[in-house]
Amino acid sequence: MSELKIYPVKENIAANALIDDAGYQKMYEQSVVNPEGFWREHGQILDWIKPYTKVKNTSYDPGHVDIKWFEDGTLNVSANCIDRHLATKGDEVAIIWEGDNPEEDKSLTYNELHKEVCQFANALKAQGVKKGDVVCLYMPMVPEAAIAMLACTRIGAVHSIVFGGFSPEALAGRIIDSNSTIVITSDEGLRGGRAVPLKQNVDQALTNPDTKCIEKVIVLKRTGGDVAWTEGRDLWWHEITENASEQCEPEEMNAEDPLFILYTSGSTGQPKGVLHTTGGYLVYATMTFKYVFDYQPGDVYWCTADVGWITGHSYLVYGPLANGATTILFEGVPNYPSTARMSEVVDKHNVSILYTAPTAIRALMAKGDEATAGTSRNSLRVMGSVGEPINPEAWEWYYRAIGDEKCPIVDTWWQTETGGILITPLPGATALKPGSATRPFFGVQPALVDNEGQIIEGATEGNLVMVDSWPGQMRTVYGDHERFEQTYFSTFKGMYFTGDGARRDEDGYYWITGRVDDVLNVSGHRMGTAEIESALVAHEKIAEAAVVGVPHEIKGQGIYAYVTLNAGEEPTPELHAEVKQWVRKEIGPIATPDVLHWAEALPKTRSGKIMRRILRKIATGDTGSLGDTSTLADPSVVDKLIEEKAKVV
Ligand code: PRX
């Protein structure tokens, strides 16, 4: 291992930050010694309609997993994100939108956001949307995406956002599982100069006979591109909002009423609908945003994530707006039209807090000075990283080239399931070690366990679990509580299992080592190997498939797919291209295999279980230490695979 560097907290940062190390230690201690008292106090970060008297009511007991926070309080999310700021900040900017084209941008003040959200909320009501209905969003990165989210929360509808890069098939699956009644989309999206046919994808998704739950499709005009129109079903956003009232009373919601569903991949089966509820989620998103980014009035905050991912929910929309911050919503990609686009946007809008992903950092790092050419980035104060482990080289480059060695980097570890950041440095409190997510946030109690579920102490490595609940935790898998218990609470009884492995050093810092299950993290996008395998075997010429992750310089992990064809089929270059295209169509471009390995057979145990351990080693060329292969039904398969690997393109 290279020599370990430590970056102590800079004095000027600690002096001006919301909290320093002593403050962190004290508050953390309070939060775990007396969680009830701690959250009773900090739940006040929100405005409640009816104050809560109960704070924490959670159980991780096998068979009875039940998570409730602030359960007798009532509130409204859009009122917390907008209305409560109007008296003091009505004319301050809530959202800055930066278009894909650097010449296009606009801002919305809190007053303007209020008006737009109320109008759209009234339009939804007029279409029959009621409290508890599920509304599917399949949107580009435009202010209307945030407006639609907030409008749903205003009337108590539950949003289910599907990332605009997912295919019609994937969209249909999510519509069906969530029983959505409305889809909100746009004619087209725009990313990196290319149009994305969103409305056309919705039309195609809705040809699936099981999507009959959808009554209306609301279409925002973004590019003005041609779209097909289904009379009676399709409605233009601008037409249904133009005469809508600018006032809409926020619905009083119970803290435990559902807020949104967001699908995410696991190690088995199809993606799960992660359900977050109203009070605990918003308390946690608001509080983490404030402390992790050291948010202070006047900051301009930019999170580069898409609203289709959890980061876009918690730290692009809800966390920043609940704090009354100015948040940038960026339609494009970090290297278009120029390699320095990300740095240019920082200068253009005087961004003081930047939150992005290791995959973007590595892609820019590969371009060297071009990534910062002609920019100063003087406005930056804090920088963040999320989505996958950040390798120390990328960390150092981010720190030096983007932040000019002035800005602490908060490497934030969390998950769709956790609702908000769980392990992270705080800018004024935590000495940094490149590659480590460092220490738990307030109220978070991580532990490492061995494979038998025994907690292991001290400097060690193991499976990362949480021994107690925090307010932002997911409540269930939508429509399948048993799957929730099975997935997260059955591996290590009485604990929440994250699916990640981690190391803890002598300072108590956590170093996330990556997933220990069959989940891949490709450019920060989470995908189950089972999902890609089932897309592959749905192809008529494919008999069997096994997918493993391999290290990839930019994406973190790449997708390596072993494919066995049906008898009589020949592996041709045409079929190679066709199979890749097929996976794009079934799931989306992010799931396209980097490598296809035509395999005559896969290594299986006598009971028919595929031995992935061997496949992983062959994929990475680590064939010197394949371990025990004697339990294979046919050990000669291994030599054959190694031989085939030489022919893989
Ligand atoms: O493996 C961890 C990795 O991303 C997984 C969660 O993915 P998702 O639900 O899509 O949420 C991503 C954004 C919160 C985790 O199980 N991960 C996320 N952040 C980090 C990370 N791994 C290491 N370091 C991080 N900072």
Image: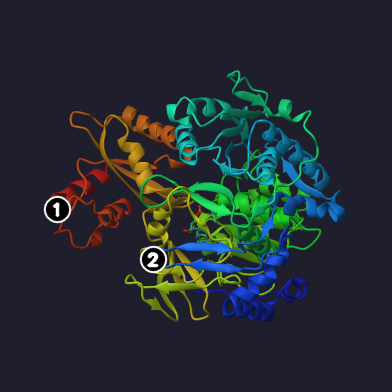
Residue at the disc numbered 2: 62
Q: Secondary structure at mark 1?
A: loop
Callout 1–callout 2 Cβ contact below 8 Å: no
Callout 2: few (<14), some (14-19), or many (20+) C-alpha neighbours within 10 Å? some
Decide: is 269 above or below 183.
Answer: below
Q: Residue at x 84, y 53 (%)?
A: 89
Q: Which quarter of the rendered picture does the N terminus lie within?
A: bottom left
Q: Residue at x 49, y 26 (%)?
A: 204
Q: Position of residue 403 (x, y in %)?
A: 68, 60
In which image quadrant can residue 51 be found? Answer: bottom right
Residue 208: mark: none
Q: Which quarter of the rendered picture does the C terminus lie within?
A: top left
The amino acid type, in three-letter code, at marker 1 is: Arg
Left or right side of 245 for 538? left
The amino acid type, in three-letter code, at marker 2 is: Pro
Foreground residue, 213 or 346?
213
